Image (cartoon, rainbow, N blue to C red):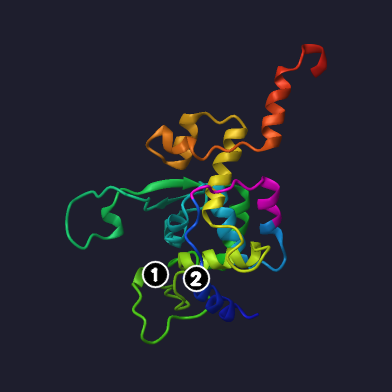
Amino acid sequence: MSEATRDRWSRAWAKRLAVPDSETPARSKMAVDRLIARREVHLREKTLWRMLYETAGRSEEILGVNIEELAFAGRRCLIKAKGARTKARRRGQAREDYVLETVYWDAGTARLLPRLLKGRTCGPVFVTHRCPGPGKVVSPRDVCPDTGLARLSYGQARALLDEHAALRGPGTGWDLHEYRHSALTHLSERGASLLTLMAKSRHKKPENVRRYFKPSPQAVAELTSLLAPGDARR
């Protein structure tokens, strides 16, 4: 299947997929790594999924990033967060009128980003594989000035993930939010404090972070082993 055909397929399925359930599952780190490592997964999707996982960012936030906002040396970038506060009250506010927040990634994303960008220096990080149709109006910020390709939408990205992760047909695969949920769960299992997790997830209220915690059976078993008699742990 060509990439252009794949994009058309994803747009069609984006309209048919149900809204994700609030009971978001936490995938194991092994499952995350294996899905991203599959040969048939395009570099664009590998990079997006790895970046979603390592930043624990919201899908719309990461998809909205432009190349000029990336700080490669510091492995970080500025994003317009959900519910971002405005610097001043005025009509027709631009992105720079909002208080931006910082997300951080690690080695996996750092290896993939340069390969994905191929020398591009501005415009959306994640773009479609074809130019917008003649009748479609797209904001200049959402188009790559070098290639004319448009920003990848949430619906397209979600449908592509579902295509690769589905086990029982379209609509049964993973949801993009699962990368954020899984990342926070894995960090909590490794002993990250609530305050550190709030800084990573950028939640303002502790109760909003706690709902992400769903320790795996393995993590619970390892925790339980701490209760064994001293000689049993030797």
Percent position (x, y) of residue 211? 49, 38
Percent position (x, y) of residue 135? 36, 86
Q: Are marks 1 and 2 in contact (CB under 8 Å)?
A: no
SS class, disc 2: helix
Q: Residue at x 71, y 35 (%)?
A: 218
- Amino acid residing under circle 1: Asp
Which of the marked residues, 1 or 2, is nearer the chain's N terminus? 2
Distance from Cα at disc 1 to Cα at disc 2: 24 Å
Does residue 2 lie above or below 64 as drawn? below
On screen, residue 228 versus residue 36, left or right, reads right
On screen, residue 175 versus residue 95, left or right, reads right
Q: Residues within 10 Å of mark 2 (few under 14, many from 20)?
A: few
Q: Please state, as top left, top right, bottom left or bottom right, where the N terminus lies in the image.
A: bottom right
Residue furthest left as drawn: 90
Mark on residue 86? none
The part of the chain drawn in magenta is: 22-34
- Amino acid residing under circle 2: Arg
Q: Quadrant of residue 94?
A: bottom left
Does residue 203 lie above or below 165 as drawn? above
Q: Residues within 10 Å of mark 1 (few under 14, many from 20)?
A: many
Residue 30 is inside the magenta segment:
yes
Percent position (x, y) of residue 109? 59, 53
Q: Which residue is disc 1 drawn over?
A: 142
SS class, disc 1: helix
Does residue 164 lie above or below 188 as drawn? below
- Along the line of sight, which residue is nearer the eye, 192 or 233? 233
- Along the line of sight, which residue is nearer the eye, 174 or 64? 174
Q: Which residue is disc 2 drawn over?
A: 16
Residue 177 is inside the magenta segment:
no
Percent position (x, y) of residue 20? 50, 56
